Image: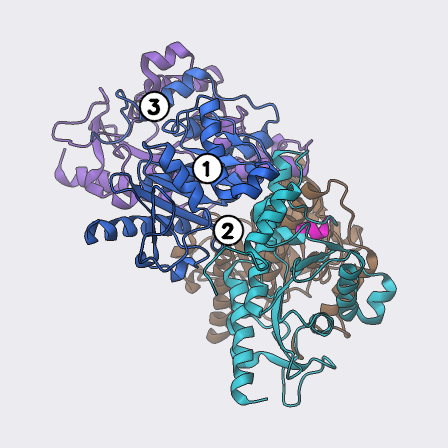
Chain colours: A brown, B cyan, C blue, D purple
């Protein structure tokens, strides 16, 4: 892997981690972002427990996409959530970046063990349907390999519920917090921001109307397709 | 249209868009402000999907008030909500600016499909009565012309409910978000700020007292007339 | 009145108005602070409807404590709430400053028409008992002299309920918002900040426990007396 | 005690107090942080009622760990909560710093007189189980020695409920507010931040699901042990 490619990957992941903080999604050190280079088989991720204001691009840790182990020469320990990230990259070649936070509203839905209903177009623009809730890990799964099995659980949940990670770019984990992803680390951060925002709107929507109804299918379809697919017309032509 | 008039219109709309962001009403790119020059038949509006920190006054797109199409020479795509804005300007010559956001509290009332009751003088100072709720579009209206029909629906709602857009300078759209307007783009932004604030106060009012009553008519009248009409005495003499 | 005394009074009121904004209690132009010089019979108050970022110390308007009319030479219109301020100063010589805002939590309690219960020591440190709620004005009182009668109503409420404005430095007005006061304009602002904070804590307290009990009398007495009266021991010796 | 050791202790406590403010946990002067030098028998603590923007490292007051009285030469009055801090240091030699705030969410749980349930991993990472609630002091305890008895009550509550202050680094006091502690003043501040955050998440969790369940024991154990004890693997090797 060339020096400049390594440096760019580390820089992208550094930028994504700092964007998480600047977006107000992170308290203390509770969050991490990563990116993958599928071709070279390398994942770049935040080091574990490092304060954001002490983080530098060169601290970003490179690990093997195949084994999840740090590449030779790496001296810092990667995020404790690395096995989760690596498993998602292994199973979902269509994604290029992942962001994990304990953002307040999404985490509260996760703690409440409820999926986040789609109550409006703000949600439908990015998530095609509810933000799904993955079940708690069993004591056996926790003992065996907590972080790896978190990844396994997410992929299983999407497979069993016939969800496409490109159309539903995030999940909340029971008693834990959200993960979001996208084609790049920057897109993963953007989706983490949207997830937090729709979690916030959904709570307030229910507070205003305890019998609130979810968005009609016709509006859900329209808004998702305004931004996605071949007939998308939101934004500037690429 | 003279160069200086064009530049001023674009600058006003740029300023209004940036004011939306500075007021905390906008997350990511979810918002847009526009202004119209009724005499020249020109509407100026934010380009679609452009990040606010990359926006410049010259990026503001000019479209025809008659057709809603970009004027010759424009290279950027206008906001996807342009047909909504243009229809309101066509039907309501008394307004000169429009602001659309997904601000949190107003959007939550929109998602909850409830109009916002007038619970106090903060509301009555700007909105004479509830902030109205427009019904969801039908699948047929969505398929035919989503954004145009959003504008048609707003104007119909005001006509059928005998509401004066000068006395009720905003609306919330079911499952979507708010629109606000005023004599200028700057006034539209101010009304978007008020709409968000009264949406926030109304939610908290109901949380404090589930049987809260709306403002008595005498207080509603007094506060609206302190600021509007020939006997207004709030602010400095014009 | 000497030039330097005038300038200091205007500066104090300017500083208090800006402190309201910096404390996050004010949206747009919804707030005003004043101070009185009882000896000279002069009240200084914010001009009506002037944006805070355009406000300068010399814009502060001087009005007569006796008549409430601007002193000769004043060119700007004083706050529309001036008659309320002047009446309180006339009736309560022990206060020297007043702050009025539409701060979110206090305003929501006012809109909900509930007094703010004392749920803890944060409240008891400043307000000896509930923050009182004044009733809505009648249509006749509104028509006759809205702002003056607001002041009359506050003073009546304190008299009829045997409340001491030195021990209960604020009130909320039904369907409207809070007023706070103190020995100086700076103290009035501080009490406006406390009022907003205890309004916020009280709402959340009830959300956490719908049967929350108010602070026991022994704790209320202890905390109020830690900060007030001859045995106070909070803060540095004066 | 050497000049440099004194200066460092004061600087650490100054830094901790300023970190409380920068973290948004403190309104006005409602908060204080302290540290102890167990070997030298000295506690350093914020002076009472001093505004944070006027605070300087040299204002931090030194008091005796044995008597709680200011050391000879100290001219400022220490925080009125000093007897609480000193008693905790006397009883719990394993802690080195204490932070007290009236942070909004933790204070609301305290006012609601409910312990804060552990609803997820954000909580379990720092607090092994609920954040405990200490009962209100009796009128007799208040009259005899309010602040000292607050400390006595905290220590008793932990002893009677078999709680380890190293595993549960904070408490909320009925009708009052939280205290947090740690090995250093900086750690105490960090735990005060976590306590506020989990108080906030817990309220929202219950708002989303009124029947929310607490974190399963297996997840609680896993998360606490990821960060604590000999098999901890979060963060960088020490």
Residue C174 falls left or right of residue A222: left
Helix, strand or loop for disc 2: loop
Give the residue at x 37% y 23%.
C223
Q: Chain of mark 1?
A: C
Alpha carbons under labels 2 and 3: distance apart: 32 Å
Q: Main secondary structure of the magenta part?
A: helix
Q: Is residue B109 magenta?
A: yes
Q: Nearer the viewer, mark 1 or mark 2?
A: 1
| Crowding near the residue tagged with mark 2, few <14, some 14–19, many ≥20 C-alpha atoms within 10 Å | many
Query: Do marks 1 and 2 share a chain?
Result: no
CB atoms of marks 1 and 2 within 8 Å: no
**Quarter holding residue B17:** bottom right
- Percent coordinates x, y for residue A36 in the rendering: 58, 65
Residue A44 visible in this rendered orientation of the protein? yes
Residue A145 visible in this rendered orientation of the protein? no
Give the residue at x 47% y 17%.
C216
Say which mark, if any, is on residue C36.
none
Q: Chain of mark 3?
A: D
Residue most extreme to the top: D140
Identify which residue, C98 or D176, lies in the foreground: C98
Say which mark, if any, is on residue D88.
3
Look at the image and tell me in which quarter the N terminus of chain B lies.
Answer: bottom right
Residue carrying label 2: A26
Q: Chain of mark 2?
A: A
| Crowding near the residue tagged with mark 1, few <14, some 14–19, many ≥20 C-alpha atoms within 10 Å | many
- Percent coordinates x, y for residue D218 in the rendering: 61, 33
Counting labels gives 3
The magenta segment is B108-112
Residue B133 falls left or right of residue D207: right
Residue carrying label 1: C151
Q: Is residue B238 magenta?
A: no
């Amino acid at each position: 892997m060339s020096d400049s490619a390594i440096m760019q990957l580390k820089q992208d992941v550094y930028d994504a981690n700092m964007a998480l903080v600047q977006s107000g999604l992170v308290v203390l050190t509770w969050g991490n972002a990563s990116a993958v280079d599928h071709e070279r088989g390398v994942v770049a991720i935040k080091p574990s427990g490092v304060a954001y204001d002490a983080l530098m691009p060169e601290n970003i840790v490179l690990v093997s996409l195949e084994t999840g182990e740090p590449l030779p020469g790496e001296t810092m320990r990667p995020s404790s959530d690395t096995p989760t990230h690596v498993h998602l990259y292994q199973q979902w070649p269509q994604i290029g970046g992942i962001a994990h936070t304990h953002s307040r509203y999404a985490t509260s839905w996760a703690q409440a063990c409820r999926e986040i209903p789609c109550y409006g177009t703000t949600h439908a623009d990015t998530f095609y349907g509810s933000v799904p809730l993955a079940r708690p890990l069993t004591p056996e799964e926790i003992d065996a390999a907590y972080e790896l099995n978190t990844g396994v659980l997410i992929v299983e949940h999407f497979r069993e519920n016939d969800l496409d990670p490109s159309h539903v770019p995030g999940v909340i984990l029971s008693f834990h917090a959200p993960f979001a992803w996208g084609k790049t680390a920057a897109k993963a951060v953007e989706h983490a921001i949207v997830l937090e925002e729709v979690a916030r709107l959904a709570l307030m929507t229910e507070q205003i109307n305890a019998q609130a109804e979810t968005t009609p299918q016709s509006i859900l379809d329209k808004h998702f397709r305004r931004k996605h697919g071949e007939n998308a017309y939101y934004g500037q032509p690429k």
